[in-house]
Amino acid sequence: MSVNRPALVQLFPLPFPDIGQRLADHFDIIELWRESDPQQAVAGRQNDVAVLLTSALGSTPAELIDRFPRLKAICSLGVGYDSIDVRHAQQKGIQVSNTPDVLNDCVADLAFGLLLATARRLGHAERYVRSNQWGGGAPFPLGVKVSHKKLGIVGLGRIGMAIAQRASGFDMEIRYHNRNVRNDVDYAYEPTLIGLAEWADFLVVATVGGPSTRRLIDGTVLKALGPDGAIINISRGSVIDEQALVDALSTGGLGGAGLDVYEDEPNVPDALKSLDNVVLLPHIASATTETRRAMAQLVVDNAEAVATRGKVLTPVPVL
């Protein structure tokens, strides 16, 4: 490694390593995820590090940021940035970028897939067939119709809009709840979560994670959604009070749930695993070849832009 070049600390392996090869044209790459002794790997290089390459599923706390006095940018793979201490970085003049837009379609596709799977009990139905119950006793329980139903969206951002577009193909009535009303959409705005939950047949959570939305969906909201309602979460597990969700589902207070995210990933409560009115996925909303490649391309583009023009391409909002 040359001390005359800036260093880039890579905290995780890129899903497509070939995409990251061009970073070597601009940086000395320190692949921290490969190191048995990360402290030793950066010893003597702290002042050289200009970029941290991180992931929305990892952790980039203030303590890590402060180890690199000349850090210019934190480039994250993923749309969420609640795992990064963005405020701390921005207060130090460090840019933070994410990979928005390139994953909207796949996340929205999966959200609607979860909605269909939850309403029509697809996971339960597959287990019913695999365990040879079909034709051998109790009939399979009826599901719930999706077309022409009422869909409430919590967080009408880019992904929320993509979900709404898909729902329109099923002739669903759509309302949403945001911090603020949007004047550029025709969907009806519900000023309270309780009001949205009371109205909706299905509630899709597509808001940001982090302290501001922690347990935003609590027992009161789930009770308002009710025994005939279902909730779908493709945002962050922290947005739903998980114990309240378990209680509502197990007692019949909530009709169903489709979950791609959890409070303590990859640990999923056994109580959820035991319920047939829940569809459980391993945080795979953006996990397609096309989308993960586009995300890897954008995170590398952001890091390269720091080297060539001093600014990231897709900065996160100032907190």
Image (cartoon, rainbow, N blue to C red):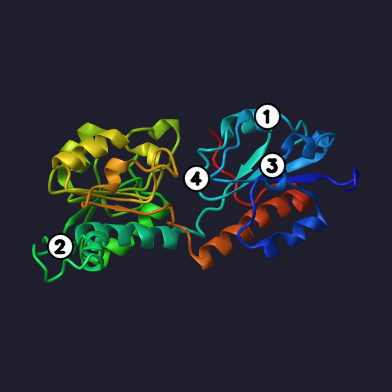
Between the C-alphas of marks 4 and 1, the distance is 21 Å
Q: Could you tell which of marks 3 and 4 lies nearer the N-terminus?
A: 3
What element does badge 3 sit on? strand
Q: Nearer the viewer, residue 238 or 183?
A: 238
Q: Could you tell which of marks 2 and 3 lies nearer the N-terminus?
A: 3
Q: Position of residue 241 (x, y in %)?
A: 31, 34
Q: What amino acid type should be assigned to the residue bearing mark 2?
A: Lys
The residue that appears at 31% across and 37% down in the rendered structure is 242
Q: Position of residue 141 (x, y in %)?
A: 11, 60
**Residue 84 sits in quarter:** top right
The residue carrying mark 2 is: 145
The residue carrying mark 4 is: 80
Mark number displayed over residue 142:
none
Q: What amino acid type should be assigned to the residue bearing mark 3?
A: Ala
Between the C-alphas of marks 3 and 4, the distance is 16 Å
Asked whether the residues under the numbered discs 4 and 1 touch, taking CB atoms below 8 Å apart as contact, a structural biologist would say no
Q: Could you tell which of marks 4 and 1 lies nearer the N-terminus?
A: 4
Mark number displayed over residue 92:
1
What element does badge 1 sit on? loop
